[in-house]
Amino acid sequence: MKTEADKKIRDNFGKIWPSHVSNLTEFLINARSAFDGDLDLFLVLAVIGDRTFASGRVSSSLTFDEFVSEDKVIPEPVALNAYSTSQFIKMPRETVRRKVQNLVDRGWVERCEDGSLRATRKASVDLLPLTEASIAYLTRMSSLFRGTQP
């Protein structure tokens, strides 16, 4: 069963799709730059970050300012290691292991006592311009969707 949002997207596809592709492309170019040309590295950190700040584990009332605050408490991650990450994103385990080590070396990921991986505060700080780019993407798409309202 299609949702109302799905129907609006399908009914306004010619307006929404080009904007989505343009904005997503711009975001991916920013991501590629932030990760020294390595979009696979970006993907590995995205999966680890998703598990670190998984929905239901972070307050839905969290504001952007709270997210970037030095006082932000980083929750214990959902159990995730290089092997489970490689299985999830269908990337060779050794490739993921090297990417994880790169992220650890950058200070963007840390290993917990149980071996689980989690994103760090340093990742939030260093990648703030990319987070801002994602907010810009979401803002543009949100404005576009509002424009499709009857």
Image (spheres, rainbow, N blue to C red):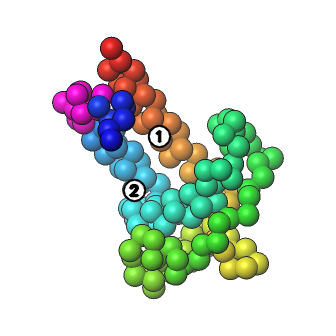
Instruction: Name the residue at 57% across, 69% down.
Output: 103
The percent coordinates of residue 67 (x first, y second) are 68, 43
| Pointer 1 residue | 133
The percent coordinates of residue 44 (x first, y second) are 49, 67
Q: Residue furthest top?
A: 150
**Residue stretch rendered in magenta on the structure:** 8-19
- Quadrant occupied by the C terminus: top left
Quadrant in the rendering for residue 10: top left
Q: Determine whether label 1 and label 2 are within 8 Å by CB.
A: no
Instruction: Name the residue at 40% across, 81% down.
Output: 92
In magenta segment, residue 25: no
Q: Residues within 10 Å of mark 1 (few under 14, many from 20)?
A: some
Left-right relation of 87 to 10: right
**Disc 2 on helix, strand or loop?**
helix
Left-right relation of 7 to 35: left
Kindly identify the amino acid type of the residue bearing the numbered disc 2: Arg
**Disc 1 on helix, strand or loop?**
helix
Q: Residues within 10 Å of mark 2 (few under 14, many from 20)?
A: some
Secondary structure that dominates the magenta span:
helix
The percent coordinates of residue 12 (x first, y second) are 24, 27
| Pointer 2 residue | 32
As displayed, is residue 76 above or below residue 146?
below
Q: Is residue 114 visible?
A: yes
Instruction: Name the residue at 37% across, 32% down.
Output: 5
Distance Cα–Cα, label 1 vs label 2: 12 Å
Kindly identify the amino acid type of the residue bearing the numbered disc 1: Ala
- Quadrant occupied by the N terminus: top left
Name the disc covering residue 125, or none: none
As displayed, is residue 110 above or below residue 42?
below
